[in-house]
Image (spheres, rainbow, N blue to C red):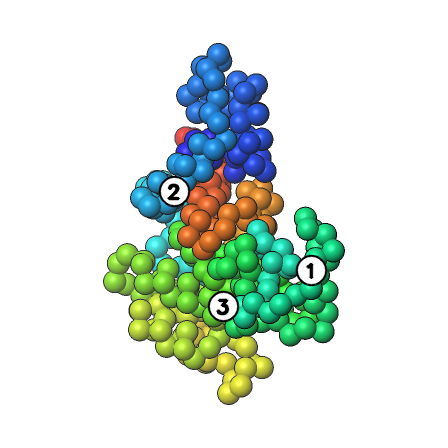
Amino acid sequence: MRAQLLQMLYSVRSERLLMEEMDYNLLFRWFVGLNADDEVWDATTFTKNRDRRLEADVARQFLAQVVAQAGAMGLTSDEHFTVDGTLLEAWASAKSFQSKAGKKTPPPDDGGNPTVNFHGEKRCNQTHESKTDPEAKLARKGAGKEAKLSYCGNLLVENRNGLIVDAEAFEANGTAERDAALVMLEKLPGTKTVTVGGDKGFDTSGFVVECRNLQVTPHVAQNHARPGGSAIDARTTRHAGYKISQRKRKRIEECFGWLKTIALLRKVRHRGVCKVDWIFTFACAAYNLVRMRNLAAAVPAV
């Protein structure tokens, strides 16, 4: 676990490279509890231990303990939150996205890396799937963008200091952001009404109704281009808290930026939604530790 944390904090791209650095870096050895002359582990140790940690849901427990520590320090809000999601590119190529019907194809020109021409072919998640990662779905960020095999990483962030409270990785099915948001909001402790900010993608009647059923006030951005108009009316937008939530919700992009650039989750190196969810949640705990250190350094001790 400590070695995995080092991999996140120092942007080490693989466990094999991490073990190479562990072999000569005394700081890394001290952090994980190895003496200077101890033999480092084999890289395959991470693969075997990951399955056990996945079954015990260790990453989610780790994130929960980090959030509890931040709460004890007075760094988190228990009333105002923000939700959003982002696409995490899967570890699968476009060539692996093939028809489920198993159509016959001509013999490949290269057995190792065959040429595949799928121009003009209609490909979608209903008729095709990746042969290397079947749970990855073809998705795109917006109109005019290229579609890639991806997962959907979702965050619930508190608005006081931008710390991640919860995380969920879902299949990129088009509604994953709203579904994950409701799952995370339902797990919030307490019975008092809270607010949740979000972008225009959350401005749907279904999401707004479900939020109100959960005693959550939706402070999502209005999408007037939506058929039927925005599901958020003046009863919500007239309050000053709505404008504050809209200003604070941009902090969640800082979390996504750190996770993709420093923790190297722009393209995940694990296959299957369970493993992607595990590593995504673990990286969120690492982000919180860095954020808490920075917040503690910004406030000098009295």
Q: Decide if residue 206 is on the left or right side of residue 43.
A: left
Give the number of callouts: 3
Q: Element at badge 2?
A: helix
The type of residue carrying mark 3 is Asn
Which quadrant would the C terminus be assigned to in this image?
top left
**Mark 2 or mark 3, which is nearer the start of the sequence?**
2
Note whether 210 is above or below 42 in the view shown.
below
**Mark 1 or mark 3, which is nearer the start of the sequence?**
1
From the image, tell me which residue sits under label 3: 173
Decide: few, some or many residues near mark 1? Use Cα within 10 Å; few <14, some 14-19, many ≥20.
few
Front disc: 2 or 1 = 1
Can you give x and y, in whole percent of width and height, for residue 85 in the image?
51, 60
Q: Which mark is residue 51?
A: 2
Q: Is residue 86 visible?
A: no
Q: Which mark is residue 107?
A: 1
Can you give x and y, in whole percent of width and height, for residue 99 in the image?
58, 68
Which quadrant would the N terminus be assigned to in this image?
top left
The type of residue carrying mark 1 is Pro
